[in-house]
Amino acid sequence: MILILNNRMVEVKGGVGSGNFGHEGRPGEVGGSGEGGGVGETEYLKIKDTVGSTSSRQANRLISSAIKEIPKSHQVGISGIVLKKSLTADYNKTREFMVELGGKKSDLPPLPRGKKIGGTYNTKTKEITVSLDVPRGSIQSFFAHEVGHNLYSRMSSSVKADWTRYSKSIPSGKRISSYAGTNVAEHFSEAYSAFHFGGKKLSQKEPGAVAFFSSKISKKFIDGFDSEWTSGVVGMIEVNGIIYFLVPEDSTVTEESLIEET
């Protein structure tokens, strides 16, 4: 498994045996979402609400709006989106359950201090899961970050090479966000997210990225937002094909989250 935190990549030994670990399938349907499905260029992504609350309906509206803002061709291959109340709680319960079954907590790495799971991307089923305890204001940029990964994996080798040359020319500290300094792929996804939902920040900090996306990827750009931009992603854990994207644990202190108080 791979752990990325504070722009450093570390390989962690161990892992969960099942390649579809963490993927619960679609409630009301038989089996999970296998490869070969997903949105087509004339369709919109489907959102599965497993919570059925006011918060999840708000999240549904925000993501639905983002889906329509981003070119459909960029979403081809993604099988769907699932809304969950708290992926962090699910993750920690799974670690405890593994111990009850005779396993070890080390089979799933502990979450870094001060971090929680904002969402996941299943590289096998191509499904995105979003946790409702992420800040309301970052849910669209978080979704766009995941679409960026999907697009990056499908880009032609020549376009990817163009981005790699550009990315390597920009020092980590000069990129759109601190997490963009992790590697070339994360730089792409962070810049892609900022291109669609970061307002003027990308043009102010990385005009070269705006030129790249405008000429090779998309014509979409939105004005606005004066504060420092971030997609909300601060780290990543990958366990057998499930990528867990981390956000600050205290992110809800300064910005209202989507989760309802109980």
Image: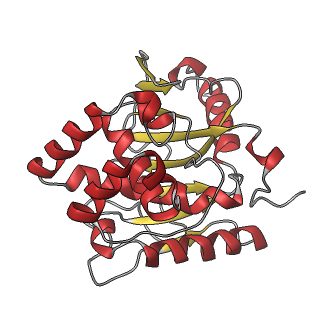
Q: Nearer the viewer, residue 42 or 170?
A: 170
One can see residue 126 in this view: no
Residue 54 in the image: x percent, y percent?
77, 73
Q: Nearer the viewer, residue 104 or 198?
A: 198
Residue 13 in the image: x percent, y percent?
41, 15
The image quadrant where one finds the N terminus is: top left
Side of 167 where 216 appears, left or right = left
Q: Residue at x 53, y 24 (%)?
A: 6
Q: Residue at x 68, y 52 (%)?
A: 134
How many marks overall? 0
Q: Quadrant of residue 105?
A: top right
Relative to 22, residue 219 above or below: below
Residue furthest to the left in view is 158
Relative to 23, residue 6 above or below: above
Residue 231 in the image: x percent, y percent?
55, 49
Residue furthest to the bottom in view is 42
The image quadrant where one finds the C terminus is: bottom right
Q: Residue at x 38, y 34 (%)?
A: 240
